[in-house]
Amino acid sequence: MEPDATEVPVPRPPVGLYVHVPFCVSLCPYCDFVVLAGAAARGPRSRLASFVSALATELELRADRLDGAFGPPGSAGRPALASVYFGGGTPTLLPAGEMASLLARVRERYGIVPGAEITVEANPGPAERGDPAGLARAGVTRLSVGAQRMDRAELRRLGRRHDPDDVADAVRAARGGGIGSIGLDLLYDIPGDSGAAWASTLDRALALAPDHLSLYALTLDDPGAEGLTGPAGDHLPTTAGARRWRERSRPQQDEDRAAEQYEHAVERLAVAGFDGYEISNWAQPGHASRHNLIYWRGDAWEAAGPGAHAFDGRTRRWNAARLDGWTAALAGGPGRAPALPPGGHEEVGATAAAAERVVLALRTERGVPAAVASVPPLVDALRWALDAGLLTTTADDRVVLTTRGRLLSNELFSRLV
Amino acid sequence: MTERAGPSCYPLRAHVPTPGSGAPADSDGAALVTPRGPVIPQERLRNFSIIAHIDHGKSTLADRLLELTHTVEGRQMMSQVLDSMDLEREKGITIKARAVRLEYTARDGRTYGLNLIDTPGHVDFSYEVSRSLQACEGAILVVDAAQGIEAQTLANVHLALREGLTIIPVLNKIDLPSAQPEVVMEELENVLAIPREEVILASAKDGTGVPDILEAIVERIPPPHGDASAPVKALIFDSHYDQYKGVVVYVRLAHGTLHDHDTIRLMASRAEAELLELGFFRPQLVAVKQLRAGEVGYVATGLKSVRDAQVGDTITAARRPASEPLPGYQEAKSLVFAGLYPLSGEDYPLLRDALEKLHLNDASFTYEPESSIALGFGFRCGFLGLLHMEIVQERLEREFDLDLIASAPSVEYRVELTHGRGALAVDNPALLPSVSEIEVIEEPWVTLNIVTPSSYIGALMELSTSRRGAFLGMEYLDPQRVLLNFEMPLAELIVDFYDQLKSRTQGYASMDYEEAGYRPANLVKLDVLVNGEPVDALSLITHRDKAPTVGRQLTEKLKELIPRQMFEVPIQAAIGSNVIARETVRAMRKNVLAKCYGGDITRKRKLLEKQKEGKQRMKRVGSVEIPQDAFLAVLRMGDS
Ligand SMILES: Nc1nc2c(ncn2[C@@H]2O[C@H](COP(=O)(O)OP(=O)(O)O)[C@@H](O)[C@H]2O)c(=O)[nH]1
Ligand code: SF4
């Protein structure tokens, strides 16, 4: 859908589903995701089983609502899902069998279109990469592997346990298991980073012939300071150790170095035949993440799991991050029926929604039609960015970010919101 | 422990029962009828002040005098009643002079009227001090027997001698084990030529010697003279604004008799008013029918602003006006100037109202609107000195609930223009004409007296040299302590000199200064340019030799504080078109959100909104956005 400032948003049925699986073997010090690690994730006191049953309940309850609002799946007002995405955390910690039954329920209650994209995030370590063959049999088409770096010392510096060889093994296993699309996540601007080290990680990752690459500058935030970690917040409080790690690491980041690393990647990946279809994402032809495009196009999606966010075209809704509250609501109890978990929502006004759509669209290589760029109130900011060389107009009359524009995109976006 | 606990001020108009002292009725003399009945003739009046270096015990002694004369009963005694503003209490100094009427039955069995006139204890207010002293015939000089003479002791004594006052020297705190009365008496003898036989040893704390002080007041200080039948001439030595009575002035009647139905005229301001009330301070106001030559009291004028009744002005009666005012009137003269700006622009109207209201009460500061690129809309204000500036700023913040920023304090320069195009006074460096238009710049100098333990002489010489000071002389007060004499540009003094003095002498040195006229100097205006645009609030006037150092410091600091922009930003310090220091803020390379997926959108939009707000709060210099904090940090650079 093209951005249009005059459109009054109406609720729409979801075309995608996001499922959050909040468990990891260990916690990375820079991680802001809703994650529980250690005993909660593995072993006799693992909370995976109660999580799976609560998740099944949430999927049912959310489907009930959608049935009520838009009719049953497959009916005219209720298209089947084009994408399902298991994110985390490390969803591959769920046994493939569980994944299969969850997906079966999703297919029944939400519908899944033939050829849909079904993604699972994975970590490369032997104990966390899961069973790709089993996942493929369950219908999973895409695996997104958290490689981060391809150097052992750098991985240790990031607090990661796996080795570069594990990444290679994970990719090989996924291919062998019949996963059709494999993506790697990589980090740059890490403490003690250098241009050469980054170039080497990039080369070694490319040697594994991934179909998709997500490259992120290490971001050291403080969700607590943003007020996101309260009881109803969508983030968990940052641990004291992680906070210290971030404070130590922040001065070891470098804006100029990061910009050079990004510019290097832009060139290197173009040579390797990748298409940079979003600020942080590159894909071989046909491998762009359809799920993520749902977000960037402003389409509607449903979501389940602690801390997960959904959007129906008008309202952004999220579950609170805390696993206990989420599980307790969904489990129900004596005299208390299972209920949807606590959380929050935000009604996005027409102007904010329009700005948001332009921002998201501009993050992608498609940008926005030149016509949109000439409509007030965005016109001034967009003209400024064209003059400043942050934007350019394409042959098919669309306005897109230049490489410099991508690196400085907040300068433009903060004028748009 | 100090004795400063307790209520913060005495209630000026509150009803305090008149103490029923056993003062015998007096029948001699004439006319003056107080509510207490007795009539006190001129020859039994004594008008005096207490002068002292800060903390030597002036307020404590005043308390004792009030107590001993039953002016305030013990149980109504509030510690140190003469200080009456919160701020004075906190800073331990007396900002506003007050006066109080004591009735004392002397050893000769007769009742005397003693008017104690309090004086401000800080050099910023030396004009007010001199006016207070002019209202007196004598002064009690209090010197701490453990500390000895300090800079303000000397300054005050000189003022008192200039007014021809009788001085009663008192060594206070002799109860202290560290008291060295012998040494200090020697200092008094050597430095001030005060014979030791005149010195009274006292402890304001335990009361020792205080009766002797009262006797000495009666015996040594001459009564006022002045003709009660001549045209009225009354000296204003203080004033305050009262919501109901308008401006209440504190006066000393030099000549004539003022009646409660008189129409008064202020000889300098030319204001006229039908007076509302006359009276004494005990210390609450007690109305009377008339005030006669020699008396000290108050006059409620009903005037709306203290501007119309300034300290030093002469009051006369409209029915039979005096032909000449009393000598020595000066307009309050500002020495230190600074811009005061509200931290947030919306508070500008509040600041304007606050200045207006405060000015009703303190006419000794000036203000006029100005604006600055960096700080927005504010006021250029003139103050008697740095402390006065601090007090005004604090009162504005505290009493009117404002958050203020002050630009760097400046002195007033005199500029003679080229080609005989006249002269101008410049108190804001940003307004200094360009080099080619200036024939000569002159700046104000001061003479500086510093009393210090002799071990710090070297450190203070160094400090003074670094401030373009010239050493004038040195005098040993005793083997351990010296009085140093310097001359120095006032501009050098107002930039943290006092703090430096204290820190380089472990707090032992004290100082005092006096204006010493204008002198030409090799001064230049240093402009700070950001991306080629001058930043008005950061312009300063400095000596040519110091300009490179100052310029380097400023540009380095700004480089740290100005966030990277989308283009490279040069920061320059320049004298005219001559750049003397340069730094560069490199262009921003990266400002991007790495991730923006489903769960991030709301959060990231808020982040962007915050960036946008941050931008809107930034001040623009040309196309460069600079956070206000950067300006503040640079302005505060001198403080650290
Ligand atoms: N031991 C002792 N302390 C005193 C005496 N007089 C005043 N002080 C103390 O010295 C300090 C300063 O006194 P204060 O009257 O406020 O000084 P001012 O600044 O001159 O008014 C206070 O802590 C007093 O309690 C005294 O005679 N003996
Ligand atoms: S593996 Fe990923 S989700 Fe898990 S803690 Fe590390 S960064 Fe977070």
Image: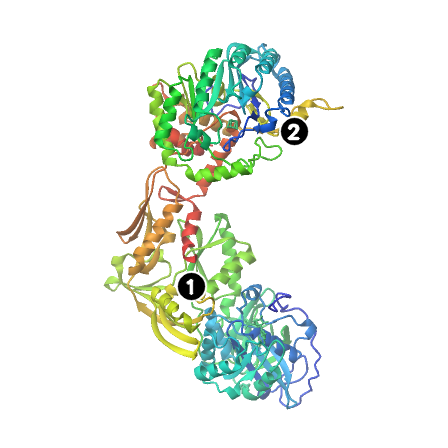
| Residue A80 drawn at (x, y percent) | 55, 12
Q: Does B548 appear above or below A403? A: below
Above or below: residue A11 compared with residue B626: above
Q: Nearer the viewer, residue B573 or B22?
A: B573
Q: Indicate the colouring scheme.
A: rainbow
Label 1 marks a residue whose chain is B
Q: Is residue B300 above or below residue B231?
A: above
Q: Residue furthest top?
A: A114
Q: Quadrant of ligand 1?
A: bottom right
Q: Amino acid at mark 2?
A: Gly
| CA separation in Å, label 1 and label 2 | 60 Å
Q: Which mark is residue A325?
A: 2
Q: Residues within 10 Å of mark 2 (few under 14, many from 20)?
A: some
Percent x, y for residue A186? 43, 26
Residue B481 versus residue A244 in the image, above or below: below
Which residue is at the far right? Answer: A335
Residue lying at 31% horizontally and 46% vertically, measured from the top left = B532
